[in-house]
Image (tube, helix red, strand yellow):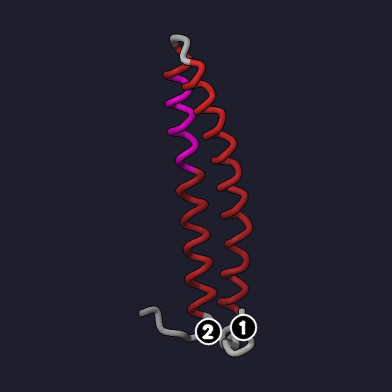
Amino acid sequence: MSPSDPVQDPELERQGRRMIGPGLRLLAVSAVLAIAGIVLILIGHGWSVGVGIAVLLLASVPATIGFGLLTGGAIARWAARHKLFA
């Protein structure tokens, strides 16, 4: 962040930074699963379409959790500066 926005709550800043790492890893896992699901759908031989859709649905779980962690981390880091949200 810029030097004009000093961190006023270092514990909250630390919590925000700690949430970003696992969030990025979960998004990477979901991207790998989603690519595998898309490949299975594109193959399109009988059962592979159904399995591809199931894999895409399974990929949505870590993607949702990862997005939530990234959002929570960003909000925590913003709140650590005691800045208004709106």
Q: Which mark is residue 2?
A: 1
Task: Name the image quarter holding the N terminus.
Answer: bottom right
Tell me which amino acid carries mark 2.
Arg
Q: Taking 86 as reference, is 73 left or right?
A: right
Question: Dividing the picture into quarters, in which one does residue 29 lie?
Answer: top right
The residue drawn where x is 53% and y is 66% is 73
Question: Which residue: 54% across, 74% down?
Answer: 77
Check the picture and name the quadrant holding the C terminus.
bottom left
Q: Secondary structure at mark 2?
A: loop
Q: What residue span does the magenta drawing correspond to?
A: 50-61
Q: Is residue 21 on the magenta stretch?
A: no
Q: Nearer the viewer, mark 2 or mark 1?
A: 1
Q: Earlier in the sequence, mark 2 or mark 1?
A: 1
| The image quarter in which residue 32 lies | top right
Predominant SS of the magenta segment: helix
In this rendering, is residue 51 above or below 77?
A: above
Rendered view: 18 above or below 30: below
Compared to residue 2, the image places residue 15 above or below, namely above
Q: CA distance from mark 2 to mark 1?
A: 11 Å
| Mark sitting on residue 37 | none
**Residue 69 percent location from the top left of the image:** 51, 58
Q: Residue at x 43, y 26 (%)?
A: 53
- Magenta includes 55? yes
Where's residue 8, x and y in %? 57, 88
SS at mark 1?
Answer: loop
- Residue 27, image x and y in percent? 56, 47
The residue at which mark 2 appears reads as 81
Amino acid type of the residue tagged 1 in the rendering:
Ser
Q: Residues within 10 Å of mark 1 (few under 14, many from 20)?
A: few
Q: Nearer the viewer, residue 74 or 65?
A: 74
Q: Residue at left 49%, top 21%?
A: 42
| Residue 9 place in picture, x, y as percent | 57, 84
